[in-house]
Amino acid sequence: MSKMASRQKMDVSRLLFDLKRCSELMSRFTGWLEADAIATCITEGLIEQFSCAFARVWLVEPDRKSLRLVASSGLYTRLDGSFARVPMGSFKVGRIAQHCIPFLSNALPDETWVKDRAWAIENNIQGFAGLPLMAEGQAIGVLAVFSHAPMAPEFLEVLQMLSLSVAGALAGALNHESIIRARVGLSNVGQDGGSTLSEQLATLLGGHKLSLLGMEKTLSPAIAQLLVEVASGLSCLACRYCRLVYEADTVAFEAMLATADGDPLLSVSGFLESEAFEAIAIKAQQMGGTLQTQANADQTVMEVRVQLPQRLFPEGLPDSLAEGLAEGLAEGLAEGLTDRFSGRVLAGEGLLNGLSGIAASPLTSPLSEREQEVIVLLSQGFRDRDISAQLFISERTVKFHAKNMMAKLGVKTRVQAIFEATKQGWL
């Protein structure tokens, strides 16, 4: 066998071996819904499985003007420092996020873009690989890997495969976290100077499309959430005019959809026949409301109207119980439709579990005072370093309390812990 053939066979064997390790690493974060935890799992796995010097993950901020360092393992584990935030398009990381081009170099100290060549030489860093984490055609983050030894070109292919799974998991987690933050925001609608429901709907719909009729009232959280879901779905369509109408005991949201050139509303019809719209209609019915649509003869104008009770439960119930039941109902309905990750139909089981869980909940929280402080801040969207600063404790201590908190509540993730605590009335 020639040396070239032997080398090619060895490269293929090494590639297959690396792909196997990559698959094992990907299986670790399957089903996770916390972006920072997924990122940390990846960086730690790269150090453990591939003997990298250190690995980092940055996530693109919502305004897409900068990237934030969320995970760092190996030689450096701190998340502060000069690269804690990287402007979009700046340094190699920012350029990878902007142009979405994977990059591999085995002569890092000689690269002109390296900010501190002395650091690379002193720490014997030779290899660098940077990959954009892509979702829906744009970068949502960057994965960077540093090594003491040169990296094989095939290793970039392995990292590209890994980055696809990482990006998908991160996109799902970021979307889930945004939904949780939205739910927390809805619980504060109209309170302490927070935005009203009409203001939130107007922001979603854009322009001056929304009119408010009647005196705005505080709605049950589940009712407000469903109206936001309707507006969010219609915001992507040709929505020309909307009204939010408060009556004695009901609230209605009405929308007129029409195309600019009079063509048939194919996109609108597609949405109205989609599973998402069907799910909204089922929720409205379960809450004691209705959702109706009506089109004109040539299908160029469509009216959508959802009418709901202002409260799901009698006024005589204590506020904490009423709110807990409302949130449990909303979550139960969501679980009772379709699990979009596995496709399993759960029927009404989620609704029953949501309500029965609240009815049987204990009156006192099992969490310690410090754990209670941590979960409250987590529910408000704060990250570990922010909680650390507010409570004057280390990030490691924050993680310690969060782990104990999840164990006491019998859940696997922080998001599940927040929901469980909310459902039980401890938040």
Image (tube, grey):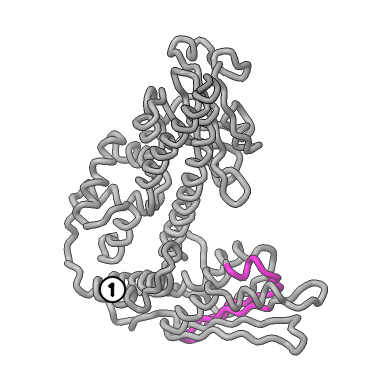
Q: Which residue is mark 1?
A: 353
Identified by mark 1, the residue type is Asn
Looking at the picture, tell me which residue is in the foreground, 301 or 124.
124
In the figure, is residue 376 to the left or right of 16? left
Looking at the picture, tell me which residue is in the foreground, 183 or 12.
12
Q: Which quadrant would residue 186 be assigned to in this image?
A: bottom left
Residue, x 53% and y 72% (percent of image)?
Answer: 276
Residue, x 37% and y 37% (percent of image)?
Answer: 385
Expressed as whole percent of the image width and height from the top left, the position of residue 281 reads 50, 80
Looking at the picture, tell me which residue is in the foreground, 145 or 59.
145
Looking at the picture, tell me which residue is in the foreground, 31 or 292.
31
In the figure, is residue 31 to the left or right of 7? left
Magenta-colored segment: predominant secondary structure: strand
- State whether residue 243 is above or below residue 365: below
Is 254 magenta? The answer is yes
Expressed as whole percent of the image width and height from the top left, the position of residue 179 reads 46, 59
Magenta residues, start to end: 233-256
Q: Which quadrant would residue 317 be assigned to in this image?
A: bottom left
Expressed as whole percent of the image width and height from the top left, the position of residue 149 reads 45, 18
Crowd rating for badge 1 (residues with CA inside 10 Å; few <14, some 14–19, many 20+): some
Residue, x 28% and y 40% (percent of image)?
Answer: 398
- State whether residue 414 is above or below residue 144: below
Disc 1 secondary structure class: helix
- State whether residue 9 is above or below residue 352: above
